[in-house]
Image: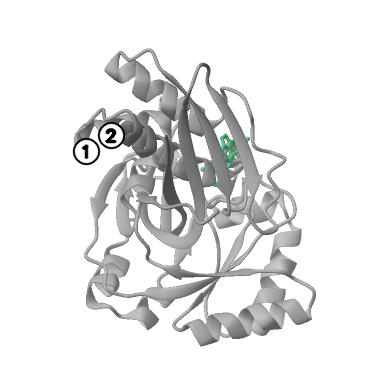
Amino acid sequence: MTLTVRAAAKVNLALGVGGPRPDGFHDLDTVYQAIGLYDDVTVADAAAWGVEVRPVGEVDCSGVPLDDDNLAVRAGRLLAEHHGVRRAAHLVVDKGIPVAGGLAGGSADAAAALVALDRLWELHTTDEDLLALAARLGSDVPFALLGGTVRGTGRGEVVEVLPATASCWWVVVPSGEGLSTPAVYRELDRLRPDAGPPAPPTALVAALAAGDVTRVGELLANDLQPAALSLRPELAAEADRLRDVHAGPVLLSGSGPTLLAYAASHADATATRLGLAEAGVSALVAPGPVAGVHVVEPVR
Ligand code: ATP
């Protein structure tokens, strides 16, 4: 028997980053949003752990580990260990989320693997335990379980679902080569040695609750942007090229290097994507917010 679970990419509508903590992490105050780019994780019982990654569309999967470092495998092993079950699984990841782009595809796969194996093995893990296991796997993984629009504090793993009514569209512009998330945080610490606590996204949370799509666009913010630009100066020109074809807000996704254009309608997002295509740049269009991990019937 196999079972397929779908998980979405994330963007950060606001990403406030504090100074480094004694444990090496940074305090965050962020607003996550799940957007309509997906990885599907299909699981089946097996004698030993294994993972296969298949690209969907133009996604370059060459940077994804195919051993125990794969986050989906780590998630599966952690779940088995939590329940004391001696079982293994073969995982197939159909990857539609660009890799190492600040879209948390690895975290999505970890969340999907947790839920898929919980269902396959009928473990009935409580939501509380799933969130706790997710937090051990990575700061973004609890959010990937939930989807929607969520405030994240702590190192991002303390999640609070927001009553967000504003829906929007994103133009996602992947970059050729990924950026290492730890390297971007190190660069931020170098640029801002005396950083205080992260700024709370109070006005953004209010605009989301009010469904004010325009105001949400005005309040998009990412503290990691200067650090990513410092490590990858070409990103400034890429952002300018995006602004040439997009009248609305433009933002770096998480630790980058993916760039995002925010649009109020599908028509506006598609116009931007077509403008980029004329300049020889490929981009994806995705709605936000979308659901967190859920079981699906595979289409192939
Ligand atoms: P972060 O979540 O740290 O912001 P990201 O969104 O920039 O990361 P991911 O696509 O999650 O990027 O991948 C980051 C790195 O994680 C990859 O370069 C890869 O080495 C590793 N990785 C481990 N497992 C996976 C997985 N299942 N899918 C993608 N990357 C994975």
Q: Nearer the viewer, residue 279 or 208?
A: 279
The amino acid pointed to by label 2 is Leu
Relative to 225, 148 lies left or right = left
In the rendered view, would you say 164 is above or below 50? below
Relative to 85, 16 lies left or right = right
Residue at 39% of width from left, 60% of height from top?
33
Q: Nearer the viewer, residue 156 or 81?
A: 81
Residue at 49% of width from left, 82% of height from top?
266
In the rendered view, would you say 3 is above or below 252? above
Q: Nearer the viewer, residue 74 or 222?
A: 74
Residue at 43% of width from left, 50% of height from top?
6
Disc 1 packing (10 Å; few <14; some 14–19; many ≥20) = few
Determine if residue 197 is in view: no
Question: SS for tag 2?
Answer: helix
Q: Are marks 1 and 2 in contact (CB under 8 Å)?
A: yes
**Pointer 2 residue:** 130
Question: SS for tag 1?
Answer: helix
Quadrant in which the N terminus appears: top left
Residue 220 is labelled as none
Residue at 43% of width from left, 44% of height from top?
4
* Residue 163 pos. (x, y %): 21, 65
Disc 2 packing (10 Å; few <14; some 14–19; many ≥20) = some
Determine if residue 60 is in view: yes
Residue 127 is labelled as 1
* Residue 191 pos. (x, y %): 59, 46
